[in-house]
Image (spheres, coloured by chain):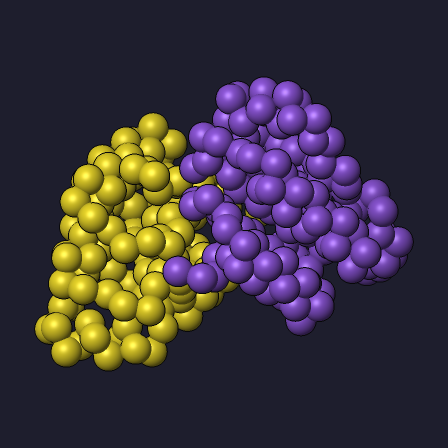
Chain colours: A yellow, B purple
Amino acid sequence: MDRIPILQMGKFLLVTIQVDLYDRLALNLETDLAQMVYKTGARGVLIDISALSIVDSFMGRIIGNIGTMSKIMDAETVLVGMQPAVAITLVELGLELKGVSTALNVEKGMLLLRNKIDSFSETDIEEQDDSSAE
Amino acid sequence: MDRIPILQMGKFLLVTIQVDLYDRLALNLETDLAQMVYKTGARGVLIDISALSIVDSFMGRIIGNIGTMSKIMDAETVLVGMQPAVAITLVELGLELKGVSTALNVEKGMLLLRNKIDSFSETDIEEQDDSSAE
């Protein structure tokens, strides 16, 4: 396998990382995600890492990169399903994951993304006003 | 890795198969899914196989098992993201995947599940009637 599938769900993209990322896989994921955000106009990226029991500094850096990249393309990134041991490792490694929010599971992550998008996007608010005026 | 993560999204469960299933992984997936359906009361199971370029008879049988098992527990199964080569292989292998519906991608799969559940579930219809009467 040299690609991690990216699933589109409405305005969001969902990525489930189930295997350790090696160089090419990580590079492909970054490229694919950037292209998918561009192509679909997605407003949020959900990264599920519930299958990972270990995260190293490379993986942490890749997740950070994805967060920064998505931010530039006007999409929020939320990391979900983090196991306690992974959280401890991230702190010990001193990785901040700037620009990446976290949530306990996919459902909470989606809720968080919706709130973020609603509070930032003026067009969404205008759309809501239009529909309530009808 | 000896477990494939199962993500809950509202009434549905989402499984992304990214690696070839071997015995224990398949067995764990069947058990985990049955338990998740029981625990969450999920009405639908979405299995994404967009990362797979090859499907063998073992994998086909496991997907069929999951479909039958979910049906018994009152949940519909939809297989999404099938690559053309995989469809051809399934036909050549003579695998019917009884009780499993298919859709092109996750979004269409969710729509299909919603329609299936709405048309079968009387309680849902009653709830809709109640809310429209208010």
Seen in the picture, residue B118 relative to A53 is either above or below; the reply is: above
The part of the image, by quadrant, that contains residue A100 is bottom left
Foreground residue among A70 and B82 = B82
| Residue extending farthest left | A94
Q: Position of residue A93 (x, y in %)?
A: 12, 73
Q: Position of residue A101 (x, y in %)?
A: 29, 63
The part of the image, by quadrant, that contains residue A33 is top left
Q: Position of residue A48 (x, y in %)?
A: 38, 57
Q: Residue at x 40, y 52 (%)?
A: A16
Tell me, yes or no, if residue B111 can be seen here: no
Locate residue B106 relative to residue A43 in the image: left or right. Answer: right
Indicate the quadrant containing the C terminus of chain A: top left, top right, bottom left or bottom right. Answer: top right
Seen in the picture, residue B51 relative to B69 is either above or below; the reply is: above
Q: Position of residue A46 (x, y in %)?
A: 37, 53
Foreground residue among A48 and A69 = A48
Foreground residue among A84 and A24 = A24
Seen in the picture, residue A3 relative to A115 is either above or below; the reply is: above
Locate residue A104 relative to residue B66 in the image: left or right. Answer: left
Indicate the quadrant containing the N terminus of chain A: top left, top right, bottom left or bottom right. Answer: top left
Count of numbered circles on the image: 0
Q: Residue at x 64, y 50 (%)?
A: B45
Q: Residue at x 46, y 35 (%)?
A: B52
Q: Residue at x 34, y 49 (%)?
A: A45
Locate residue B126 relative to residue A16 in the image: left or right. Answer: right
Tell me, yes or no, if residue B78 can be seen here: yes
